[in-house]
Amino acid sequence: MTRILITSALPYANGDLHIGHVSSTYIPADTYARFCRLKGYDVVFVCGADEHGTPISVAAREAGRTPLEYVDYYRERQLNDLKALNISFDNYYRTHSEENREITEHLLLKLRENGYIYQKEVEEFYCEGDKTYLPDRMIKGTCPYCGAEDQYSDACEVCGRTIEPGGILGPHCIICGNPPVTRKENHFIFKLSAFSDRLYEWLKSDETGENFPKDVVNYVAQWIKTGLQDWDITREDYWGFKLPYKDAKKNQYVYVWFDAPIGYIASTINWSKKKGVNWEDYWKREDSFIAHFIGKDIVYHHFLFWPAVLMGTEEITLPKKYVVNGYLTLEGLKMSKSRHWLIPLNYILKRYPADYVRFYLAFKAANTIKDNNFSWEEFQERINADLVDNIGNFIHRILHFINNRYDSKIPEPSNFDNLDNEFAQLISSIVDEISAYYEQCDLSKAIKRIIESFKFANSYFSAKEPWKTIKEKPEAAGTTLYLCANFLRTAATLIQPIIPQSAEKLQKYLNIEPEEWDSAKELLLKPRHKIREAEPLFEKIPKEELEKEIETLEQQTKQTEKKEKAEIEINEFNKLDIRIGEIISAKQLQGELIQLVVQTEPNKQTTIVGKLGGSYKPQELEGKKVTVLTNLKPRKIQGIPSKGMLLAAIDGEKISLLVPDKDIETGSKVG
């Protein structure tokens, strides 16, 4: 029997889930798991809360709780929301567990034994004001690779690169805002660079792109070609597991991104204890088929760090399938927790059936890192047109007709004509078509093809006109309803992975038990089989309800913007020394950073470093008059003191400098 271990990315236990999370990861993973079970595979679908790291400890402190109390609270809330969405985990566990600690320590010791862990003196940030070492998420600064500002010190959200400890430019403490000092510490480092060739060969081993998305493989391969940096897995004063090495200091812990993916194994171990089976059958055999479902924000960790760790231990089977989906925007804009521009999962599930959410978001899951958009208007359209008018209408027409005209019994068919044969062929062939899409985890194509098949079924029923032929040619009407009922039996299996509650209701109306996938190809509903009285499966979303949702979303954002745009006194504005300056010289630095020398007064020049390379070339800037904030507190960027800021309008990635519309003297004050 085919054995498949399915994982979905572990939700970080520091807040409620929103629709973006489930669109990229949990709905695709659950759909695949349900499909594999229908195929008769031995499936284990695991997940759990990701509970370690600095954001948890900082948030817990602000909430007046211990880190464990904090993660317990959000783990329970997230799990309840996922259950309400009918995500069918075999086990939902947690990273802060004995199973995870034990397997993490074992793998760390094994890696060191195999020569892939070494010690190195590194510079660590320390906040003298708060008297603590500052882990990654307690420091912000400028990305050393692309120049993006306001980034956490461990990873850049703009370019996706991981930043080594001490590598962030212009760092400052997120608690007090002051720049930290550096202290030297002995850290344990994982030799990621030693696996460059093996990782590249492994990535390219899936030539067809059937199991590794090609766009992701090409993306990751470029990182390998530019050179992988060894990975610091040590953190001081951390919320997590202590390093298991005897020569580690008491305040040294395992970096969260080392133990988080090991949580997949820990969840399997926990499940195996309850079931009395061997977890190693799913993780250590050559025929183990491990499939990871993730969002594109954690590609680097899952395609480089995680497989390299497994290669280094020489114990665990490498993943054989990855499914990666992009971000979900909301009404065309990036979701934002701070601006309340998002839709919490518990909010939408209180207002609409879980199958409505699953059905609509399945359109967005095509196993590609391209971003998608959630629109309330499109949500209503998909539900009303595709689910209610097309699928639901056909189901109700057929069941109601059999209930009323055939005493709820499947009629006897007669000889098939050409259109009957075409419909019977569709019933047989569509099963393999949809199967291929589910194997590829392209839910978008699967659901579109299912909709097309219902459209054909509707047109077949209308063309056959059984409400007329039941009197004139009763045998022809019987054939029509016989085929339509069998199509519904097949369709119940096809839709089950995406909208399981609706599929279960349909099977109940047909008076059948859930069946295995391949049996859906056959016409197994026999004449005189008794069905039950049926009710409509779906209801339309009223227009006024849609308008209310959009209004609620906009009001939340306006309230937040009102709070953010607090009024200031004129004396606060007067503190800003804004002048018209002239760019004397411009020099390209690393990434999109440009170093400028700007004349701000007749006999005064200042150096400014800014992220302008995406919109301007150095030669375009020389001689340009600009608007400059001159009394900004200096900070170092790429080792260069930056003593001001150019004022600009920003629209997404576009940057447009604010320049005077008339010739005016350099040094003129703006006010």
Image (spheres, rainbow, N blue to C red):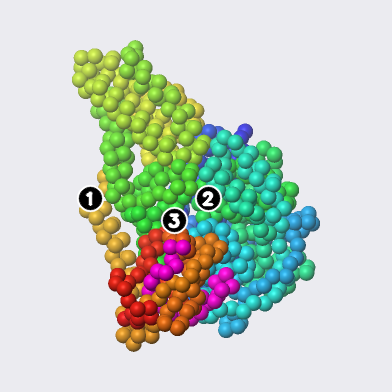
> Which of the pair 406/49 is nearer the observer?
49
In the image, residue 452 lies at what x, y percent? 35, 32
- Asked whether the viewer can see residue 354, the reply is no
> Which of the pair 58/647 is nearer the observer?
647
In the image, residue 257 lies at what x, y percent? 61, 60
The stretch in magenta equals: 619-642
> What residue lies at 56% left-to-right and 79% top-to-bottom?
179
Tag count: 3
Q: Which residue is mark 1?
A: 543
> Which of the pair 572/580 is nearer the observer?
580
Camera-near label (3 vs 2) is: 2
> What residue lies at 42% left-to-right and 79% top-to-bottom?
600
Whether residue 368 is in magenta: the answer is: no
**Amino acid type, callout 3:** Asp
Q: Which residue is mark 2?
A: 294
Task: Please give left or right for residue 525 compared with residue 549 in the image.
Answer: right
Q: Which element type, helix, strand or loop, lies under badge 1?
A: helix
- State the quadrant of the C terminus: bottom left
Q: State which quadrant residue 564 falls in.
A: bottom left
Task: Please give left or right for residue 172 compared with residue 404 in the image.
Answer: right
In the image, residue 398 lies at what x, y percent? 29, 29
Q: Is residue 408 above or below residue 195?
A: above
> Marks 3 and 2, Cα distance to the nearest angstrom?
18 Å
> What residue lies at 45% left-to-right and 75% top-to-bottom?
598
User: Of label 2 and label 1, which has the lower sequence position?
Assistant: 2
Q: Which element type, helix, strand or loop, lies under badge 2?
A: strand
Q: Which residue is mark 3?
A: 81
> Which of the pair 367/231 is nearer the observer?
231
**Label 2 Cα neighbours within 10 Å, binned few <14 / some 14-19 / many ≥20:** many
